[in-house]
Amino acid sequence: MIMTAGAAGGVVLLGACGGGGGGDVKGAGTAAVSAPAIGATSTPDLGGGGGQRTAPRKTAVPPRAATLGPLGYGTLRLGMKAGQLRGSGLLVGKVRGRAGGCDGYDLRTHRTPKGSAGVYYSARLGIATIFAVGGMRTPQGIGVGSTLAQVKQAYPRLATGVNGSSAPVSGNPHAVYSLLLKGGRVTSLALDLAGQTCHN
């Protein structure tokens, strides 16, 4: 399920980790968008130079045809740990999570606006969430802007809820797609590691 918060001017806010994606946050107004909002500033360096913009490195950049799922996006995989990410140049730090929370990053190749993040890292699980940004689509062709009918056709086992929907990820029993739909269209999509606690 994905949480949104109006306080960030139409950005999504994670509930459990101090920033993130989809649905209703207790005590906050709501707005639908595609990347999660964040609230802190400093993150551990996992290969992207923290919050500072640095000269681009030659890195393994996801090819144009890369899809979101079933294992990750391009060379970024769900469950990757800090040791695998350091020096990769894949991520740019955005926000440090609160105690025991998740840190927010962007893909170096797909930056999100200020106050949002495209990737969440959990000290316990590694890469826990990758949000669909920059036109990313699932292998079944679903992305932000897809209609509910298209989602149901692609994912017949779609589970709908009050604050969001989810679908199993074909080819990865350890992952789930989390979707926020508004007005019959996908407004937020994430590839989540099952059991992640970065967002609802």
Image: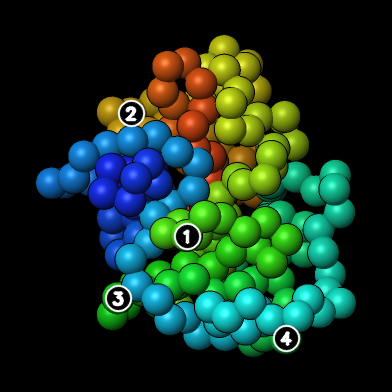
Which of the two labelled residues, at mark 4 and mark 1, occupies the earlier sequence position? 4
Q: Nearer the viewer, residue 147 or 156?
A: 147
- Tell me how far mark 4 sits from mark 1, CA to CA: 24 Å
Q: Nearer the viewer, residue 116 or 165?
A: 116
Mark 3–mark 2 contact, CB under 8 Å?
A: no
> Dot 4 surroundings within 10 Å: few (below 14), some, or many (20 or more)?
some
For residue 59, above or below residue 31: below
| Residue hosting label 3 | 98
Disc number at residue 161? 2
| Residue hosting label 4 | 87
> Dot 3 surroundings within 10 Å: few (below 14), some, or many (20 or more)?
some
Which of the two labelled residues, at mark 1 and mark 2, occupies the earlier sequence position? 1
- Tell me how far mark 2 sits from mark 4, CA to CA: 39 Å
Q: Is residue 12 left or right of residue 110?
A: left
**Which dot, 4 or 1, sits closer to the camera?**
1
For residue 106, above or below residue 179: below
- The residue drawn where x is 47% and y is 16% is 184
For residue 198, above or below residue 35: below
Which of the two labelled residues, at mark 2 and mark 4, occupies the earlier sequence position? 4
**Which dot, 2 or 4, sits closer to the camera?**
4
Q: Is residue 86 visible?
A: yes
Q: Position of residue 135 (x, y in %)?
A: 69, 39
Which of the two labelled residues, at mark 3 and mark 4, occupies the earlier sequence position? 4
Q: Is residue 93 left or right of residue 70?
A: left
Q: Of the residues shown, which amino acid type is indicated by label 2?
A: Gly
